[in-house]
Image: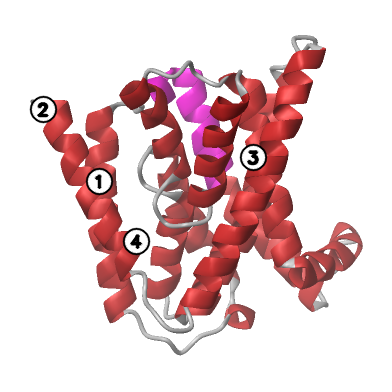
């Protein structure tokens, strides 16, 4: 791939991965609307590694806390904040992994990658996010997260397998409906992305063993680095803006894009 193609893909992935506007939808739409060649699995994994490193760096205090809690969890002890958070993150990841395997084995995952599907999910879940953000109470913080919350948000996260839904958008929606304040709803959503990206990226990487050459590795490294920088900047900007504004700007973008895609799909 050319450096320009890698730059475009990395910027799109990095910017849209953590904003509630669906990175998968934008990556699917890019070749459909521009004629660019599909980036392939190697670049997919690479840009996800870049965004994974970005979210882990931004929430490094939480990541360190969870890492320290994992050994206690492995010994069957959930008696520290880190062990408890690690346990809840695992629970929240199970639904999306289970449904993802079902969609992959049945072939339904490919049937959902259409402009019409993305248009409807952009529009519908954008409106749902708006309603949840406006009506949701702001009385709970991330440390109030319970087992029931993890299960509920895990089920919400599974919906993100439908292109255009947005993993961050749908989990933020679920967290706002559960009464989490705006900033901590986004924080929980971002922390949930870490095991999800690791699991999905790991499964995809298994399909690549023995099929990667040196040039592909170079392209992947460049894409990962660019995605890391763009994701870190986008994540930092969103978290700072949440102190002053709501999710409405993202909702407006989703509705406009969804409407345009539906016009294109049905015309």
C-alpha span from label 2 to label 1: 14 Å
Q: Main secondary structure of the magenta part?
A: helix
Residue at 55% from the left image edge and 21% from the top image edge: 39
Q: Of label 2 and label 1, which has the lower sequence position? A: 1
Q: Which residue is mark 3?
A: 48
| Among the 4 quarters of the image, the one containing residue 67 | bottom right
Give how far across and how far down residue 36 sits, in percent. Answer: 44, 19
Q: Of label 4 and label 2, which has the lower sequence position? A: 4
Label drawn at residue 257: 1
| Among the 4 quarters of the image, the one containing residue 47 | top right
C-alpha span from label 3 to label 1: 23 Å
Q: Which residues are magenta?
A: 95-110
Q: Which residue is mark 2?
A: 266
Q: Is label 3 in a helix, a strand or a loop?
A: helix
Residue at 58% from the left image edge and 70% from the top image edge: 187
User: Which residue occupies the foreground of this view, 47 or 70?
Assistant: 47
Q: Which residue is mark 4?
A: 250
Q: Nearer the viewer, mark 3 or mark 1?
A: 1
Q: Of label 1 and label 4, which has the lower sequence position? A: 4
User: Which residue occupies the foreground of this view, 216 or 161?
Assistant: 216
Give how far across and how far down residue 13 sits, in percent. Answer: 54, 42
């Amino acid at each position: 791939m050319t450096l320009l193609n890698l730059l475009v893909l990395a910027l799109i992935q990095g910017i849209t991965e953590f904003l509630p506007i669906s990175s998968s939808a934008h990556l699917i739409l890019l070749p459909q609307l521009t004629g660019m060649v599909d980036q392939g699995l190697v670049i997919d994994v690479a840009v996800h590694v870049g965004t994974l490193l970005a979210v882990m760096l931004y929430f490094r205090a939480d990541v360190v806390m969870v890492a320290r809690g994992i050994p206690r969890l492995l010994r069957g002890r959930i008696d520290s904040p880190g062990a408890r958070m690690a346990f809840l993150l695992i629970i929240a990841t199970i639904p999306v992994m289970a449904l993802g395997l079902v969609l992959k084995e049945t072939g339904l995952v490919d049937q959902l990658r259409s402009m019409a599907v993305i248009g409807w999910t952009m529009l519908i879940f954008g409106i749902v996010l708006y309603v949840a953000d406006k009506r949701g109470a702001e009385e709970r913080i991330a440390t109030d997260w319970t087992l029931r919350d993890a299960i509920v948000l895990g089920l919400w996260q599974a919906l993100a397998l439908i292109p255009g839904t947005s993993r961050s958008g749908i989990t933020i929606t679920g967290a706002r409906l559960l009464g989490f304040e705006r900033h901590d709803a986004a924080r929980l959503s971002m922390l949930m992305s870490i095991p999800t990206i690791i699991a999905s990226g790991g499964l995809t990487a298994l399909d690549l063993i023995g099929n990667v050459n040196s040039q592909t590795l170079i392209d992947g490294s460049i894409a990962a680095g660019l995605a890391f920088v763009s994701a870190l900047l986008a994540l930092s900007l969103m978290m700072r803006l949440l102190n002053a504004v709501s999710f409405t700007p993202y909702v407006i973008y989703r509705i406009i894009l969804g409407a345009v895609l539906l016009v294109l799909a049905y015309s």
